[in-house]
Amino acid sequence: MKALLVASLALNVILGAVWVLRPTPPAPKVPAPVVAVAPPPAVEESGAMPAPALPQPKAWVELASRSPAELKSRLLAAGCPEATVREIVTMQICRTYRARLLAEEARAVRDWDFRKHQDPKALRERTRQQREWREQMITEVEEVTGTPWVEVRDNLLGWPRSGGAAGDYLPGEKRRALRQLDLGYRESLQEIQTKAVTEGWSAETRAQQRRLEAEREAAIANLLSPEEMQEYRMRESPAAYYARQNLPEAASESEFRAMVQAVIDAGVVPESRSMPARYGLTGDAEDPESAAREAKLKERLEAVLGADRIEAMRQVEQTRAEEARKAEEARQMAETRKMLQNVAASLGANEEAAGRFFDRLQEIQAEMDAKFKAMEQTLSGTPEEKNRQMQQAVRAALEPLATEFMGEKGTAVLERMMRRKE
Amino acid sequence: MGNRPGWLAGLGVSVAANLVLVAALLRGPGPAAEDPPPTPAPSPEPREKVVPSPALTPEPKRAAPFHWSQVESTNYPKYVANLRQMGCPEDVIGDIIRADLNDQYREKLAAIWQPSGTEYWQKPRREQPDKEEAARLQALTEEKRQVLTELLGSPQGEQSWVDLVLFQLHGPEQELLFLPEETQAAAMQALAEAGFERKEEQLGEAANRSTAQAELFREKLAILAKVLSPEELEEYRLRYSPAAGAVRMEVQYFDCTPDEFRALVESREKDGGRYANLLDRRAAEREAIELFGEERGREFGRASDLFYINARRAAEEHGLPPEAATRVWEAVRLARADLERVVSDPTFSAATKRQLAGSIRSQVEARIVKAMGEAAATGVLRDVQVVLGGMERSAQP
């Protein structure tokens, strides 16, 4: 019995040990939670601004993209300020187009036989191509940044903000379409104008210009709503241009619009005077309808503005023209003074003294003019001989003054200036 | 046997315990497996209790995702250094910094002077800063340029940036395009370091533009000589010197060889414009005879005469043969010689001179129209009117 008890106790120990040492069951698999996005490192939970960690050396590689739209979205996602994104993306677009321009120009420059002028036809074609690329560049910038080109440009260049830029009365898409349309006509219109300005206006060039202008106007009317078209006519049409350039300044927006409408009603179109006509040579063919149009414009302007207002405008214009003439005269005087000083400096004379000499000449100009005019009556001989005598008289009168102000070098300075005048 | 009931009780407990243990062992591994949690909740406990996915494993050495605030700084040198650190290309760094600085300087510049701006209905105004304002604007622009140069470590011109934004190409950048790209870059750098952008701007203020232009070109050649090979420099000179431009005008209808072109450019560079008069080719023709021999020299004299050039151009436009231009040139040459004799003859009265001059002019005009036709002759007739008319007027008392 005792042995049975011992055996049972031993079995207790063995079974207990087996139970204690039995294997542990495997743990259940836990599904992985969604990975949390790391917050920007700028602000910690405490709210304090920590010093940002240095960027990874290759961080730009992960941001860069050839696609401006993709680059923009990556930069924005990385927390880059919108203005900086606009600058980076715009400049990437500008650089892409510039690379294209440089490649094309390099090809043309290398192909050029520089013993001759560049072929005018090829030059015109390159200019046309460049205008087209520029237009594409601007369109792409506006589309990607969502900002009007004028604003982007002024911001990048630090220029004063343009404010009411031409075309800002149109939505972006229409503005771009209008620019594109204009590009198509610009080449042909410019060709006509160049021909007319260098050789003189003919009935044929006038007719061509009118036909093209009418075609362009019809195409624009097709593109814009009637309200937009009216704005276009008042702001950017040839009639608006004519009113700004050729008519007295309007006192208000409504007055200007009335004036533009009068120009449209009269059918007047801007026409630059040709070079031969400017120099008094036979140049521009008579336009038989021109006088009638001018008369109609005068009549329409008087009707909408009143004769008193027209007279007041004329007087303002006269004052303005006189001021402009005086300003131009002053500019030319300053230029001549500078030229005299440069000549003096190149001959080793004192620049300041040369300036004072010039000022003195201005003071006595009226007196000198009267003296030389009287002398002119006493001269005799051929025109060349008279001219020679006059030059000698001027030299004799001015030489003591030049020496007084500039010392012995004064004679050489005067001589150089007179030869230039000859 | 007095303890037998105690033994029996102990034996019974032991056997019972054995039975319980055997039953427990036969049932399975243990209580945990018996009652597993159906969906275990994420454990806040240390992760060694679960098998973690790699994404959850903390990697202390891996950097956080990039954020722009890591580079942006109000301290520009630091901003530039950070941008470089992140591998940002130099031109992009330049773009960012320059745009930022331009924005800052806009206000400063506007405080000195800015155009008043006009509405679409107002006349455009030609507003200019006065002398003092222009000088202050220039000084501020120069200050900005220096700040940029210091920040970016290389000379920074304003014009190249404007050209890039406005899609313009001109000046040295365009001229140097015939060279290999590396040479272009080195040449642009050399010109920038010599302050050429400013010098070219100042050209507009020069009293005598053509002299200043020639002087500046010589200066430019001296700078480029340090970067270009002698052959490249020579080609640059023949392409872009003011003298080369004048020679191209003269030889547009003279098929000159490269050596002839070079000889003419060298001559024009020395003579200071003595041979450039296209209306009077006598001196230029004499020189060309010395340089190229009698036949080529005479051909050059004819082909570079203004009347020949204009007549030839009109002939091309109207599909006429070059001989038509030669006939016009010959007629005008003779008429000018005749008129010169008449106006300088002291034996003729003023009235006789007028009459003879009128007759010479009518004859030459008729010959021109005969050679070219009415339409093609228009421009040449206008030139005749100007030149012969001028000779007639100079003879009048």
Image (tube, rainbow, N blue to C red):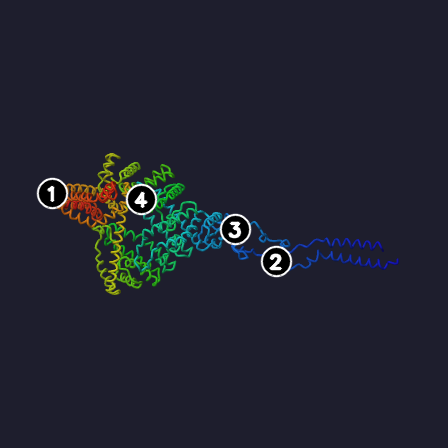
- Are dots 1 and 3 in contact, CB under 8 Å? no
Q: Compared with residue B212, is residue B20 higher up or lower down, i.e. above or below?
A: below
Q: Secondary structure at mark 3?
A: loop
Q: Amino acid at mark 1?
A: Phe
Upstream in sequence: badge 4 or badge 3: 3
Q: Are marks 2 and 3 on the same chain?
A: no
**Mark 4–mark 3 distance (CA, rounded to whole Å):** 57 Å
Q: Chain of mark 3?
A: A
| Residue underneath mark 1 | B348
**Mark 1–mark 2 distance (CA, rounded to whole Å):** 123 Å
Q: Amino acid at mark 3?
A: Ala
| Residue underneath mark 4 | A118
Q: Chain of mark 2?
A: B
Q: Are marks 4 and 2 on the same chain?
A: no
- Quadrant of the snapshot with the N terminus of chain B: bottom right
| Residue underneath mark 3 | A53
- Are dots 4 and 1 in contact, CB under 8 Å? no
Image point (36%, 40%), residue name: B223
